[in-house]
Image: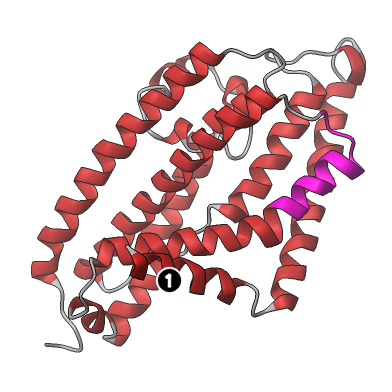
Amino acid sequence: MRAYLMIIANCIKSTFTYRAHILFQILTSALMILVQFFIWRAVFAASPGGIEGAVVRGMSFDQTFLYVSLAAALGVLMRTWTDWDMNGQIRSGDIIMFMFKPADYMKYMFSNSIGFMAGNLISITIPSAIVIFGFFGAPLPGVLNTLFFAFALAGSCTLTFLFDFIIGTTCFWTMSIWGISAGKEVIIAFLSGALIPLGFYPEALRSVMVWLPFPYMYNLPLSILTASKANPLVWAQGIGVQLVWVIVILAASRAYYRYSLRKLTVNGG
């Protein structure tokens, strides 16, 4: 356990190595937030009731802007790059070094992912949130919203890692995951609510999506944080379903990884 904590700490430190990169990411996030502000301001201004009184699919302008802007900030936070790290290790042959270490490879990659996301949280996501709540004047969430959001966000980050690990494991078979990883990003962005709130989707599509794990990656934590009224029972049920998906996908990813080890080829060996 101590070894994994050291991995997390080292990864957090490495996040702050390239300060110009952090500054660029903050500026990029701020620009995306600014674009989202004007896009949704135009949408609600054209709706009956205007910006102050319009309610579109059960969401006001403040709720919608807070949702999409935080989704952009969380997109940076939950970008683990685990699949690309594994791809690089396999192509270079460095992965064989991890196989002989007295540590579980999946736990090692998860610890690395936690450290990377924690570094992004401190250096990029929190500054982006300060911009959203401070500069744009978005309404602050309640204490109960924030508490449940924290639990849901932990589950969302875990699901993100598991999907990235599955894609990275696929490199054991293909040696390249560029197309597969790009497809994964598109699917998650569309089905998780990372682009727009799922409430804006057609009812028929939402009835299907509710049975998939993707809405529990972005839509669940963001819906909790932007809710105008506290609903602990519904939130707890959502987090419970999210936990079930974490367990199911964790078991599937472990089984897939162990089976894929048989197909691992390092430098033609």
Describe residue 160's horizontal placement relative to residue 172 as left or right: right
Q: Nearer the viewer, residue 93 or 116?
A: 116
Q: Residue at x 50, y 34 (%)?
A: 152
Q: Which amino acid does label 1 sit on?
A: Met
Label 1 element class:
helix
Q: Can residue 195 be seen in this view?
A: yes
Residue, disc 1: 6
Please identify the quadrant where the C terminus is shown: bottom left
Give how far across and how far down residue 48 sits, in percent: 87, 10
Instruction: Give above or below for 29 relative to 203.
Output: below
Instruction: Give above or below for 25 relative to 233.
Output: below
Q: Is the magenta stretch mostly helix, strand or loop?
A: helix
Give how far across and how far down residue 80 sits, in percent: 48, 60
Where are the magenta residues, as a range?
Answer: 126-139
Q: Is 4 part of what is drawn in magenta? A: no
Give how far across and how far down residue 54 sits, in percent: 84, 13
Give how far across and how far down residue 12 sits, in percent: 56, 68
Q: Residue at x 58, y 32 (%)?
A: 149
Instruction: Give above or below for 149 relative to 102.
Output: above
Please identify the quadrant where the N terminus is shown: bottom left
Name which quarter of the figure residue 89 lies in.
bottom left
Instruction: Give above or below for 10 relative to 27.
Output: below
Q: Residue at x 69, y 62 (%)?
A: 123
Describe residue 1's horizontal placement relative to residue 153 as left or right: left
